[in-house]
Amino acid sequence: MNNNPLAALAGSMDLFRKILETTQDVYWVIDKTGHFVYVSPSVFCQRGFTPEEVKSMPALESIYAEDRPMAQQTFSLGLEIIDKGLTRLPAGKVRLRQVHKNGGFVWTEVVSEFFFNEEREFMFVLGISRNISQLVAVEDELTALQAAG
């Protein structure tokens, strides 16, 4: 057994990197200006964009146009709360459509949380986007069946 803390940290970082590279969920980090600073490689499978392409656009542009006002309101509300001095916001969960490179969209469930440094200054938003398109399709089908019956 290796008791070297640096080796243990490197091993855990390698494990974390492997998890990020193999998961279907998209992990991302957005700074206070609303730009992506990290996007996991799984974004390519979920939305057809490379991480570099996503990082080159404002985060709001990754959201389907009809859902942008809700996303902007949520982000702005978080920043407003931060400006008032609150430094612990509960993780938020929202369903929204994200733009696919093919011109369509993907239904996603987004869980995100604001993070702060030791001086209680806002640092970034960490989020996870999960593709729920199949779930939404089934829900729509059930709704249609209930309405018909």
Image: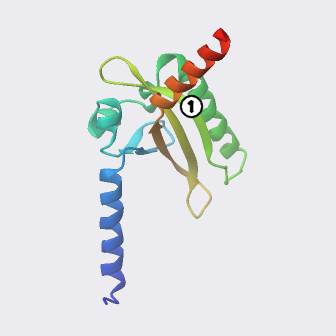
Secondary structure of the residue carrying tag 1 is strand
**Which residue is at a point 32% across and 59% down the rendered structure image?**
17
Please identify the residue farthest to the top as the structure is shown: 148
**Which residue is at a point 27% across and 38% down the rendered structure image?**
52
Above or below — where is 7 with respect to 15?
A: below
How far from the left and from the top, in percent, is residue 55?
34, 37
Instruction: Name the quarter where the N terminus is drawn.
Output: bottom left
Above or below — where is 57 with respect to 128?
A: above
Above or below — where is 17 with respect to 42?
A: below
**Which residue is at a point 66% across and 16% down the rendered structure image?**
146
Instruction: Name the quarter where the C terminus is drawn.
Output: top right
Please identify the residue farthest to the front as the structure is shown: 149
Other-residue count near label 1 (Cα within 10 Å), few / some / many at <14 / 14–19 / ≥20? some
Q: Amino acid at mark 1?
A: Arg
- In the rendered structure, the answer to whether residue 106 lies left or right of residue 53 reads right
Residue corresponding to mark 1? 95
Q: Quadrant of residue 147?
A: top right
- In the rendered structure, the answer to whether residue 136 lies left or right of residue 79 reads left
Q: Quadrant of residue 42?
A: top left
**Which residue is at a point 71% across and 51% down the rendered structure image?**
86
How far from the left and from the top, in percent, is residue 14?
30, 66
- In the rendered structure, the answer to whether residue 65 lies left or right of residue 142 reads left
Mark count: 1
